[in-house]
Structure formats: C-alpha cells, structure tokens
Image (cartoon, coloured by chain):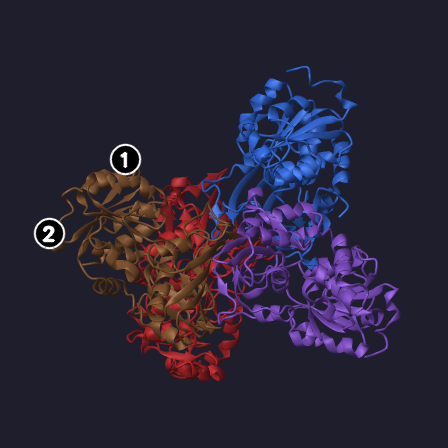
Chain colours: A brown, B purple, C red, D blue
Amino acid sequence: MASKKGKTRRRKKVKVAINGYGTIGKRVADAVNLQKDMSVVGVTKTKPDFEAKMAVKKGYKLYAAIEERAELFDKAGIKIEGTIDDLIEKADVVIDCSPSKVGAENKEKYVKAGVKAIFQGGEKESVAEVSFNALSCYDKAIGKDYVRVVSCNTTGLTRVLYLIKENFGIKKVRATMIRRVVDPKEDKKGLVNGIMPNPIALPSHHGPDVKTVLDVDITTVAFKVPTTLMHVHSINVVPEEVPSRDDVIEVLKSEPRILLLSEKDGFTSTAKIVEWAREVRMRYDLYENCVWEESISIVDGEIYLTQAIHQEAIVVPENVDAIRAMFELKSRDESMKITNESLGIGSL
Amino acid sequence: MASKKGKTRRRKKVKVAINGYGTIGKRVADAVNLQKDMSVVGVTKTKPDFEAKMAVKKGYKLYAAIEERAELFDKAGIKIEGTIDDLIEKADVVIDCSPSKVGAENKEKYVKAGVKAIFQGGEKESVAEVSFNALSCYDKAIGKDYVRVVSCNTTGLTRVLYLIKENFGIKKVRATMIRRVVDPKEDKKGLVNGIMPNPIALPSHHGPDVKTVLDVDITTVAFKVPTTLMHVHSINVVPEEVPSRDDVIEVLKSEPRILLLSEKDGFTSTAKIVEWAREVRMRYDLYENCVWEESISIVDGEIYLTQAIHQEAIVVPENVDAIRAMFELKSRDESMKITNESLGIGSL
Amino acid sequence: MASKKGKTRRRKKVKVAINGYGTIGKRVADAVNLQKDMSVVGVTKTKPDFEAKMAVKKGYKLYAAIEERAELFDKAGIKIEGTIDDLIEKADVVIDCSPSKVGAENKEKYVKAGVKAIFQGGEKESVAEVSFNALSCYDKAIGKDYVRVVSCNTTGLTRVLYLIKENFGIKKVRATMIRRVVDPKEDKKGLVNGIMPNPIALPSHHGPDVKTVLDVDITTVAFKVPTTLMHVHSINVVPEEVPSRDDVIEVLKSEPRILLLSEKDGFTSTAKIVEWAREVRMRYDLYENCVWEESISIVDGEIYLTQAIHQEAIVVPENVDAIRAMFELKSRDESMKITNESLGIGSL
Amino acid sequence: MASKKGKTRRRKKVKVAINGYGTIGKRVADAVNLQKDMSVVGVTKTKPDFEAKMAVKKGYKLYAAIEERAELFDKAGIKIEGTIDDLIEKADVVIDCSPSKVGAENKEKYVKAGVKAIFQGGEKESVAEVSFNALSCYDKAIGKDYVRVVSCNTTGLTRVLYLIKENFGIKKVRATMIRRVVDPKEDKKGLVNGIMPNPIALPSHHGPDVKTVLDVDITTVAFKVPTTLMHVHSINVVPEEVPSRDDVIEVLKSEPRILLLSEKDGFTSTAKIVEWAREVRMRYDLYENCVWEESISIVDGEIYLTQAIHQEAIVVPENVDAIRAMFELKSRDESMKITNESLGIGSL
C-alpha cells in the first residue's frame, strides 16, 4: 500500500473523488460536500451531457472518466480539469459510482495509485476487503482501504433487520422484493407491461448479500415491475422473542434512518410517498427506509412489515459514513449523527 | 326453495344464464357452451357496447342486465330478448359475473325465482352456502343451491397448495401476491407509476379466503403494480415432510390445471408467457397456474415457488365444475376431466 | 360588487386565499408567498392528509374546504382555523384550485362575499369575466373581479404561439397534444397500457380554448398516454412571413418563460427533462415551456416544433400575474419580471 | 440472376422460406400457409426458445438462422433440418423478417443463391429494387427479385392516404405518430414513464418512407410512449377537392383493409380495440387500419382522422401480396381479394 494513505489526514479534510457522477455519484457528491471533515476534489463523467454541465454549475471540478472521450467535452464547450488518472492523484479516496462491474475494472487504477476506494453494491463482495452498512457493521471498515457499500435493497433490508435482531433476536427472515425496473431517468431500458421474476431460480442473491453485513438466516425472492419510483419490500421475520406490535414500532421509530409513514396520512402507494418527498428534499431524495406503520403486524408470533426504499438515495449516507470509518475519523454513532444532521435525516 | 331446482334435470342439459357478460362472463359463457351437459340460455349486459354485439354475433341470447337500460339497446340497434328477470325464468342456474358486491345485491332475485346461482370471488363468503374450488372441495358443493367460486388469486393459491398438502402435508404457508392493477381492457382506472400495498395493514384477505376452500395455515400479503397481464405469486411452504425438488415438480406436473414453464424456453416474464399464450388460445386464456419450473426450490426444508396467474381466465373451469357439482352430474374427477378436455387443458 | 374590493389596496399586500391546497394550489401558495406585494392568508383542504400537514408545517393557516369535514381534521390532530367561509372573509382574492367543475360551484360563495376570484382552466370560459395568459392578454384582466387562468395545455400553446404571431404572423396552427394521463401523485386512476384519443371526435377543445386568450386560427387534437411526468405538444404553424430556423430560435430564447433544451445535452425524453429539473427546483417544478431546440424546423414554409409542458407547474406564474392585473398593481412586463425573478424563471 | 427464378413457377406452389420466425415472421408464416398458391418450406430461429418449439409444433421445418448456434437446438432437444443456407436452397423466395439492418446483411446470401427476397420496413429503401404496398403500388413489384415491404407505420399511412388521394386528391399531409415503445413480448427494453420525441430533429423519416410507395406531399412527426399494444396516427390532409365527412367515411368503408370503429361501441382507446380483437383473431392480430369513425372530420376544408395500427400484424397481408406480384401470379385486385379472404379481412 502506498504511503499516501496516512496518519495525519484526520485533521485535514479527506479529499474525496467521485468516479461516475450519475444517479448515485451526484447524490454522494452533494452529501460529501455538506460534511466539514471531507471535500469533493472532483467528479468524473463519461460524456458531456446535462449532468456534466450540472456538476460544473455546482462548482465540482470535472474530469473525463474515459481518457479517449476527453475531447468530447471540449467539443461540447465543457471545461474539464483532466482525466480520471489526474483526479485520482488529487484524492485520498475514490468513491466509485460506475455502473455494475465497471467498479471492479477500475480497482486496478486505485491500487496502483495507492488511493483508498469505496465501491457500490453492484460489485461483487470480493471487490473490497469488507462490505459495509453503517448501522450493522461500521467497525469492520475502520482503517480499511477498500470498502463496498452494499446495494439499495441490501441496505434497506439490513437497517430494519439489524434493529429487530438487536432487540428481539432473529431466527429466520423471508423477504420478497418488488423492484422498480429502471431509475426515473432511464428512457431506453425497462419492462413496459409485465412482471419479471428476477431471478427466476430461487432464492435471490439479496439474502447472501445481507449476510455480508449482518449475521442472520435470510431467504429472499425478487421481482421487477414497471415502475421507476421506489422498491418495495415485504418482510417476514421469525424473532427469537416475540415482541408486541408496539415494541416493533418503538424500535423502528428510535432510528433516524427509518421513517414510519401512515396510511391515515394518505400514504397509499409509493406514488404518494414521492409526492410528499418532492416537498421536503431536492430530487425527492429519501435516505430513510419508509416503513408503512399499519403494515407492522405480529401474526402467529412472526413479524410482518412492508417498506419502500428510494433506490437512488438510500445508500448516500452509508457512503459518507464509510469514509469516516476508513479514515478513522469518528465512531459509528458520531459519524451517523453528523451525517444525519447534514442531510436532514431525523428532522422530517 | 322452489320446485324448479329438481331431480330429473340430470338427463337434460342444465340451462345456464350468465348475468354479466364481461371479462369473466364472456369466458364462462364460451366454456359452458362447449359442454355437452349444459347450455347457455342467455347472457346479460348493462350497456350496448362491442361486448354486447359480440355476444349476439356468437349466438347468445342477449338480455338487459338493468331493466331501465333496456331501451339503450334498441337505440343502438341491438336486439335483446328481454331483461334479467326474463332470463332468470328460463334458467336452471345463474352464473353471476357482476362486478364485486353487485352479485350479493342480485341474490334476492335468484332466491325469489327459485333458481340456483353461482357467485364469483369478489363477493363475500356469506353470499353462498359454500365456497368452491374444484380440486380442493368439489364435494362440498354437491347438490347445493348457492355456490361461490373463489377469486383468481385464491384459485391459483389453492390448486398448488392442495397438491402440496395432499402429498407432503403443510405446516405453514406464506405468500406474497403481486397483482396486475387492472385488466387489459380497462382504460380509466389504474396505477400508472408506483407500487401499492393492497392492503397496507397486514395480513391480506387472501389467506382467510384460501381457508374457505382448503384447511391450511396461511398468511398472505398483496401489492398492486402497473401491469395488466397476469398476477404473480411468490409462495413459501413449510411442509410436514420435506420433499425433494423433483418430488414437487412431479406432483405439480401430474395436475393438468398446472403448467410448468421454463426459463430455458424463454419464459422470463409474464410478457413472454402471454406472447406464447396468444398462439395457443383465443384471448390468450390460460386456465392453468403457470409455475416457473426453475423457481421450485427447497431451502432449509421449505418449499419456494413462483407462479403467474391469468386473472381473466383461471376461474373459468371452476365455474363449469361448480355447475356439475350443484346438479350432481358428475364426480370431481369426471367433471374436471370433461372440463379440461373441452377447454384444451392438459394438451398444450 | 361589495365595497371590499377597493382602491387603497395597492399599498398594502393583497391578501390571497388558496381554496384547494392540492397539485396546483400548493404550488400557487408557495409562489404567492414569495411575492412582496401579496400574502397567503390561508389555504383549504378537504381532508387531513400529508398535504394538509405540509401546509401547516410550512406555516400556512389551514381551513376546511368542506364545512362538514372540519371535524376530521380535529380527529387527525391537525389544527384548522375554520372553514372556507371564514377564510373568504379574510381574503381580497380567492385562487380557486378545486378540481374541474367544482370551481364553478364555489363561485357563488365568492360573489356573495364580495371577494375577487381566480379560477383554473378546468372551468368553463363562462365562469369568469376574462380568460388569462400573462404574455398574450394581461391587460384584459386589469381591474377585473373574476378571471380564469387557462389550463396547462392552453398556457403552453399560447406562450409559443403569441411569440410566433407577434414576430412572424400566423395564418394557421395545427397542434397534436400527447397528454400525461394522470399526475404523479394519482394512484387510482389512469390508463395502464394503451393510447386514448381524448376526445375521439375532432377537433379537441384546446383550439377554442387558446382562442379565449389569443386570436389565432388553430385546430387541435389530443391523446392520453400512460405517463405521469409531462405533456408533449407537436406544433405546426403556417406563418404570415416565413422566418428562418434561427429567427424562431432567437424569438423563443428571448422569452424567459420558454426554455430551449438540446438533444445534445442528453434531453432525449421527458424522463430526462425531469431528471434535470430535480436538481434545479423543489418538486422539479418547471414553470417554463421546454422546447426541444433540434425540433424547431422550417419545412415548406411552415414552422414545426416540439415542446414538453410540466402540467403541475406551468400555470403557477400566470396565477401570480393574474393577481397583479386584477388589483392593478403592475404592468404586464413589470409583473412578469417580478414573478420570474421570484421563481427563478430566466436563471436556469 | 440464377436460373432458379423462372417462368413455370406459376403452376406450382411458390416455395417460401421465412428467415426470422419472430414477431413478424411467425405471422407471415401462418398467412403464407393459408394460401393455395404458396407453401412454407421452412423457418429459421436464432435460439431454441418457445417460439422455436411453437414453429415445430405447427409443423414448420425449423432451421438455425446462425450456423454456429445450430448445436444449441440439439442441446435443447429441438430438431432442426439444417441452417439458413440449407433452407435457402429449398426456397423460391425468402421473406427476411430479421431485426432491422440484419436483413441488409443477409442479402448477400440470397443474391449468391439466386433466390428472390422480400425485406421488411426496418431496412433502408436501397436494400431492394422497389418498396411495396399492395394498394398503392402492387404493379411496381411485378416480376421483381428484391422487394421491401414498408414498415407498419408507413403501411398504415399509405393505405389511408392512397384512398384519399385516389378519390379527392391530396395537396399536403401532416401526420403525428404516437408509437408503442416496444412490442408486447419485449421485457428488457422500453420507456417506462415518459414521452420520447423519436426523432427529436424534425421531420421524421416516415414522410419520406411513404413517398417510396405513394407520391404525396407529406411531413411527419413521431413519438414513443410507454405502451405495447398499437401505434396511433393523428392525420391531417389538405385535399385537392374538399369532400364531405360522409364521402370520406364511404371511401374508407369500401376498402376491406380499413376498419371503422366507433366510440359508441365502446372503442375508447387501443386497450378496448385489443380487447375486442382478442375475440376475433388468434394473437388478436389486426391486419386492418382501425380508424375511429367519430374522428373523421372536415375542418376548414381539411380532413382530420385518427387511426390505430397493430404493429405486429398490419404488414402480414402485404408480404403475401408481394410474393404474388414478384412471381406474377395474380393482379393486384385478385391477390388482395385472395389474401383478404384467407385471413378473414373484410368479414369482421
């Protein structure tokens, strides 16, 4: 490991590069930008589109993610500071927000440059030293060089299951995930009319993925459906000790990264949740699990609940916390508190 | 009970009236029409649209479902034979295919006229003497006057669970239903972009509804998603005796009302299933549960499987069988065999 | 007309009530709230849902839109200040943002109370003294008591056509409107899979509606399609004098309420426009016509262009300007300038 | 040109190969199979999926479209007769139903083998000697070796415009096409929520494409919307002589390949048209333009009308007629009559 990753960094701001200023990258950039102990040294884009222009407008230094495409930015009249290699030179850590599998291909660059890196959940577990969820396993990432923040679905499951496990114990979890087929900005891919088991052979990979960040017996099934807004999880938990419904509500309410929403307030679907979110956060970003309060039930000693997960936003605070763990800046509770306050988590 | 419902009817064709020639009614009419031991004496419509014209074109005698609207048919140049009251007079049994809750309102007419009646699953259990699924409880309907054929979702669940129960025993069932939000012909209602827990408070009514036709411990959860083609069920069963995956496949394959479809053949979604069905049945009617073969799994001693249910068609054979039970025409196995052969079930 | 509507009002802030704090109402409330010469004295809701809570949270005084439902708010623990009648007492003008047709029913209340009122485009032309679009006919509304701000589609058409007419003259306009079927928050209505001519008999009402605010020969056709984000207009204009493509671009660029967006920047669909808008405005509100720059063409002496219209937001600045006209606060250009600056129009 | 394409063929059945048994290919195969003067000698598939199995089940001889993939069929237990090269040897004409652009790549094979070929509208005009629409230019294809049947949208436009031109003359046509984004069987591509101008730069290629089969002044604009069922065309025609609305209706009614559907019968959207079609044709194939009768209007001397086009089926009869023209089997009117009768066109 190169000497660049060092000891005195804790007092200076951690220099963060975002490789891939897209759906996740642009959100993580804004979130990092709000932290006092870190700064965004630059972001990359593969092409000079409106997202690239937005990055510049927001004051981020822009770099070409792919060297050969650098001239496209010139032609489009967008100033870039260099290419990804130049950016890596300036960074203490790269948050790789490339499309799935591309992160793994990029890793070599990071290793060569002796820079730490955070990967997203589209990459395999083996891309990093540890997989990460702030609540469930912050400490595992302390001082690490390569960390993988688990996917939106895994993050959503893990938060809720961690709280249930800590409080009531868990014998077994069964979860069915009903996934938005593409993000809102996508206009070429999709499933227009139909339901797609994804995968068809059971169980899905989400169960094993949860196990990378939480020790729990879990089996999952997943489907894609023609919507863009949010994923929905139908969760069944067999607890060690059977809580009352109120016990579960109390536990979930205690965690700022979980929101309880009520049908009584008109939250009848993910469409309504987003309608509300449009009033409270730019880009209607919901960093929190949205659990329907009425869905929380105890049936024959098992816990049932339904939650909606904003796939574009939920991993954003986890990326910020991962940086703090990797640079040993703060403890789990301190980091989560700072991240929450900066993003407005806990104050809706 | 009036004398009309009687004993000698077995040798003559049972005279069947369809009250409500819509999505279910038109399919049941065609299915009844294919049986040698019954005949369609007439169908009703509330308005003179293309479905009414189609009924006439197919040779069904048309009646106004609502007396005051009879003149609309005249104005539209569609000949009707009278109103629902006239039709009831000619029938041995009315299959009520009205929208949910309207069937219950109609019941008084049937009772008054001393005619037997079959209701659909949108009605409450209490509308009839017994709830009906051919496989699981044919005999309960023998000789009965008022029978309720359970809904598409309940029918789909019951067929699979009956087979598993008979062969391996069932300790517990958990099922998540991902429902098409409206039928394909609907152009005013819907959910265009979103996922709707339906209901939000858990569990859903489908579990108790299954119990009206099969004695099994079951908890269900349901969602509406923006598609029109088919429902999809994600089913988890804790069996009394743990079968092998092959055992489950063999049991399901043995029942003609269940089809095993394979991802290897390109069945990656309900869109693909319907594409195939368009080649094999008019209206792409799938009377069979469509179980993805690769989804059948044994995980920690529990059975998992995923099935697609064609909500427009699956209850059609059950309505035919219900008639035979009510008029004591045939045993379960005889009736199902005749119905299957007439509809092409078992020969795809 | 009661004495309440008077002369000295120009120095004091105009007191504005919003009757119907829904999709349009909540946006108009926020816009009015940003003006120095007006203030929101209260808003109404029919039920105590998350929008009602949001109104309170934002500091608006909340009133029950329907007297009999006032107690529902109490039960839900939401404080209201009274009912719509109480609110009218406090207002100089009511902006009626009720669902279509309800505005006309409400008018009697406003007349009785001697308060001015603005209606939305879902109401018939006859509900008000004049129909209103800021660019095309601000002066017609000066000093008026009842004004109707035309609909989102009519506003979008009028802005573009006014500019073309002023600069090149118009012989004839033909427009095809492809409408989002429901707003994003709707989860019960819709068209899930299909295209609906709306109306089927041609031409559509939009042409005559444009004529209420701009003297132009126009014929329109409209369709509903299964999307929630924006309407799209395909416009063909036969000009008096044929401009060059650059002339048209220049004219449209000169108007702040029109944005030219380029395919080169990645704006390939309404999905991409909304993705961008999520970064620049709360609720991704686009008050501007979004015209695709590449679509602007001169073919055989006729102008073609394609624009996207954010149905939730586009009439918001028009409502603000209508107030200024009705209370004779400012000239057209002054009012539009103030409104634009307050809403960020012209600075994206 | 090889001697294979000859003179005596008229008495024997024309041997037709279908290269690409997909959405169009499978429909053309079934249609050719219904003709007395032609026979299907084989069909090709690129992979052994349910469509391949269906081809075999229907009795078509199956060949591998791509030589290297032949073994995949063996592995899947599907018997093939050889590869595309073997099939070409047996054919008088190949109907190339490959995806867009692949047809042009295949042409070399056909030329080399000295076999005639029909291409679909996804190919460029230059792929063939002539472009083809039965009504408008049957005679141009007589005796030709390479013919291109124009696309579904062009076919739909051409039929209607040919009839209007023949009867009333045409000065100018303006058409807006609202296109289904993907076919029903597609489950990976799409546009889930949005409207996409396609293309953005105007006008679209459909106008020039119509001109390959009909001499008319036409400008077109096109959009993709999230539906799978049918395209919809909004058409404006400036005629030489202004007809009455009834004149237009009469002319359209006289052509069997055009259906007039009425809102009065409940045809309020493409969803309703398909609901009806499911009762009258396998695969709900509508070979006819579906014109909404109420949409036909004369406004200021211009004709307006709206039609729905079933993109999967409308070119099927044209492919059959193209064969007859190329082999000089029948005149236009004779061929169209035979094709229509075999497919049930004109008898709905």
Q: How many marks?
A: 2
List x then y, in percent, for residue B119. 70, 70
Visible residue check, residue D34: yes
Q: Residue at x 77, y 64 (%)?
A: B73
Q: Is residue B79 above or below residue C42?
A: above
Question: Are the residues flagged by discs 1 and 2 from a single subunit?
Answer: yes
List x then y, in percent, for residue D298. 64, 50
Tag 1 subunit: A
How far is disc 1 from disc 2 in space, using C-alphas?
Answer: 32 Å
Q: Is residue D303 above or below residue C134?
A: above
Q: Residues within 10 Å of mark 1 (few under 14, many from 20)?
A: few
In the structure shown, which secondary structural element does the residue marked by tag 1 occupy?
helix
**Residue at label 2?**
A8
**Residue at label 1?**
A67
- Is residue A63 toward the left or the right of residue A165 in the image? left
Q: Earlier in the sequence, mark 1 or mark 2?
A: 2
In the structure shown, which secondary structural element does the residue marked by tag 2 occupy?
helix
Q: Identify the amino acid type marked 1.
A: Glu
List x then y, in percent, for residue A40. 21, 51
Which quadrant of the view contains residue A48?
A: top left
Screen quadrant of the N terminus of chain D: top right
